[in-house]
Amino acid sequence: MSSENRVTLIAVIVAVIVGIVMQVAFKFPTIVSAVVSIFLGIFVGFIVYLITNFMNKRKR
């Protein structure tokens, strides 16, 4: 497994945990925590994508 995939997988797991914690702490419905988790996962994946592109451009 490449390091990018590992980082993305860890980010998605953390996003799900944050969504569950927010659900318990603020008594949100399950759908709200699911949506928050999805958006956090997409956001972190996008950040990883940008960092990867920046590093690849720098190596050239």
Image: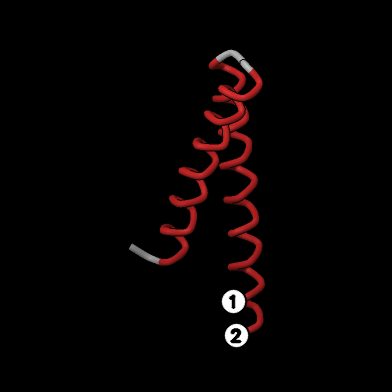
Residue 50, position as x, y percentages in the image? 66, 62
Residue 43, position as x, y percentages in the image? 65, 45
Query: Can you say which quadrant of the picture contains the N terminus?
Result: bottom left
Residue shown at 62% from the left, 30% from the top: 36
Residue 32, position as x, y percentages in the image? 61, 20
Residue 48, position as x, y percentages in the image? 59, 59
Q: Which residue lies furthest to the bottom in this view?
A: 60
Residue shown at 43% from the left, 58% from the top: 5
Considering depth in this image, is 41 or 23 the residue closer to the camera?
23
Look at label 1 and name its amino acid.
Asn
Looking at the image, do the residues carrying marks 2 and 1 touch, with CB atoms under 8 Å apart? Answer: yes
**Number of numbered discs on residues:** 2
Considering depth in this image, is 25 or 51 the residue closer to the camera?
25
In the picture, measured across the screen, residue 1 lies left or right of residue 10, that is left
Q: Residues within 10 Å of mark 1 (few under 14, many from 20)?
A: few
Q: Residue furthest front?
A: 25
Q: Which mark is residue 59?
A: 2
Q: Quadrant of residue 59?
A: bottom right
Vertical side of 39 occupied by 2: above or below: below
Residue shown at 66% from the left, 72% from the top: 54
In the picture, measured across the screen, residue 13 lies left or right of residue 29, that is left
Considering depth in this image, is 5 or 22 the residue closer to the camera?
22
Vertical side of 56 occupied by 5: above or below: above
Q: Residue 56 carries which label?
A: 1
What SS does tag 1 mark?
Answer: helix
What SS does tag 2 mark?
Answer: helix
Look at label 2 and name its amino acid.
Lys
Q: Which residue lies furthest to the left in this view?
A: 1
Q: Residue 16 carries which label?
A: none
Vertical side of 32 occupied by 9: above or below: below
